[in-house]
Amino acid sequence: MKLLTGNSNLPLAQAIGAYLEIPLTDASVRRFADEEVFVEIHENVRGEDVFVLQSTGFPANDNLMELLICIDALRRSSARRITAVIPYFGYARQDRKPGPRTPISAKLVANLLETAGADRVLSMDLHAGQIQGFFDIPTDNLYAAPVMSADIQARFSGRNLMVVSPDVGGVVRARALAKRLDNAPLAIVDKRRERPGESEVMNIIGDVEGRFCILIDDIVDSAGTLCNAAAALRQAGAEDVVAYVSHGVLSGGAVARVEGSSLTELVITDTIGAPEAVAGAEKIRLLTIAPLLAEAIKRIADESSVSSLFD
């Protein structure tokens, strides 16, 4: 088994390599003067089971091209099996046509990965579960819920917990986390989005007064949804509001927005290389999913069950 990484999230790749007790494959992923991506693998991978770790977040197109070219280089180097490990799957929010004459970009990315030569895909908390069906190769979708629930129980045990979905679409995710927290009660924030990147909280379904609220979502981008939801929960009498999010995109002024919000804390996993602003943020904490990804990689390499990780 070999582990190759692009430039999107080197700390996560190093943590996974340390967990698996294997060194990262010696390779160069660099740019020519005109910004074309060039990949050169400096060790023999013929007949090897290779895992390519690369999130496709910002800059999404650069990171995607790195991943595709890494896969192509491995295929042309006679690797036995190539698994694309994509902790954050960019373009996942474009999983359907929102209107006429628009693309389904998530499907296009799936096609590109298969054409490049990927034999398998491993991702984390896909924005839409049906993206697995966009592939004609085995695709595993891991969930951060076990890692999050363990952290919540370690830090907030004994609090009057209530799990809150920031929108109607996230109810299934929130219910799954609530089940892991001894069937904690559930609330839903009903929001109406006025324009992209902004949201207006309308009302809360459920009694949150005196509760320690855990907001759960898969992606925090502009942070408008979470911050507005936190404000609404506070106004409804919530004792405290902490948010757990799988993918911290945190674009634009998101970090500053979180710092000035009603959130006590925002916990994000390390699927995406954190922006520099996160390091100095008082309200944002990183939670690693390296052991979970590493264990899934090990099980795939050993041909054992991945789904049993979540039993």
Image (cartoon, helix red, strand yellow):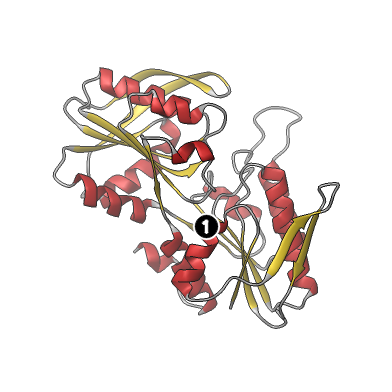
Q: Work out which quarter of the rendered image holds the C terminus and state it.
A: bottom left
Q: Which residue is mark 1?
A: 11
Q: Seen from this angle, which residue lies furthest left? A: 158
Identify the secondary structure beneath mark 1: helix
Q: Amino acid at mark 1?
A: Pro
Q: Is residue 212 above or below residue 232?
A: below
Q: Position of residue 28 (x, y in %)?
A: 72, 64
Q: What residue do we see at 69% from left, 53% from top?
A: 110
Could one spot residue 223 in this view of the protein?
no
Q: Quadrant of residue 133?
A: bottom right
Q: Position of residue 162 (x, y in %)?
A: 24, 37
Q: Position of residue 180 (x, y in %)?
A: 27, 52
Question: Would residue 185 appear left or right of 100 to someone viewing this image?
Answer: left
Q: Seen from this angle, which residue lies furthest bottom? A: 47
Label 1 packing within 10 angstroms: few (<14), some (14-19), many (20+): some
Q: Work out which quarter of the rendered image holds the N terminus and state it.
A: bottom right
Between 289 and 149, the residue placed more toward the observer is 289
